[in-house]
Amino acid sequence: MSAHAAEPTPGVPPMPERNPKALRAAIAQHAPQLLPDFDEHWKRAIADTFDIGPLPAFMARWWGEYAIARDPELDAHMADLHHRAAESTDLADAQALLEEASEIRHRVRETEPGE
């Protein structure tokens, strides 16, 4: 297991309050590369449907995306895991790399506001 997901790098912005407005503001300020996809997903899944049923799944996805993107070291580590998995000719190695990435994604979803 990698130490990359244990704690954010010093200087990494804290997680916002756990609501769509605060999360969008944090993305806009600290990870603007995510904003177009966040807004498109919001429009398609929530705004255009007038249905808040998908909101928990939406928040879980984007909470994790932001938790990774706000930490340049963790973001680079995740990109490296995916790149190495894609380039691997050994199925077991590729699977292990993707499992590590999946474990990190699940773990960062548990990050609390302010952490």
Image (cartoon, rainbow, N blue to C red):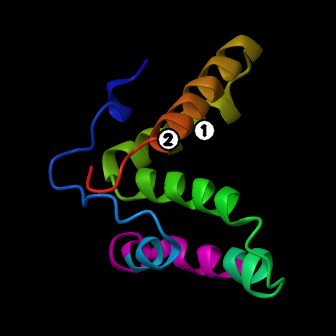
Along the line of sight, the residue nearer the viewer: 87 or 39: 39
Question: In screen coordinates, is 113 left or right of 95?
Answer: left
Considering depth in this image, is 77 or 113 the residue closer to the camera? 113
Q: Quadrant of residue 106?
A: top right
> In the rendered view, would you say 103 is above or below 112?
above
Using the image, tell me which numbered label, if any, was put on residue 82. 1
| Image disc number at residue 15 | none
**Is there a contact, CB below 8 Å, between mark 1 and mark 2?**
yes
Query: Image point 73% across, 86% down: which residue?
Result: 47
| Residue bearing the label numbered 2 | 78
Q: Of residues 99 and 61, which is closer to you in this image?
A: 61
Question: What segment is highlighted magenta in the picture?
Answer: 26-40
Q: How far across and how far down the image is residue 35, in percent?
A: 53, 78
Does the magenta run of residues contain 104?
no
Q: Mark 2: which amino acid? A: Met
Identified at 27% across, 36% down, the residue is: 7
**Eyeballing the image, is 33 above or below 10?**
below
Identity of the residue drawn at 40% across and 80% down: 25
Q: Secondary structure at mark 2?
A: helix
Taking 8 as reference, is 68 left or right? right
Lateral position of residue 2 relative to residue 20, left or right: left
Q: How far is disc 1 from disc 2 in space, using C-alphas?
A: 6 Å
- The local secondary structure at tag 1 comes to helix
Amino acid type, callout 1: His
Bin the neighbour count of mark 2 within 10 Å (Cα to Cα): few under 14, some 14-19, many 20 and up. many
Q: Is residue 27 magenta?
A: yes
Outermost residue toward the right?
49
Q: Main secondary structure of the magenta part?
A: helix
Q: Using the rendered view, name the quadrant where residue 87 is placed.
A: top right
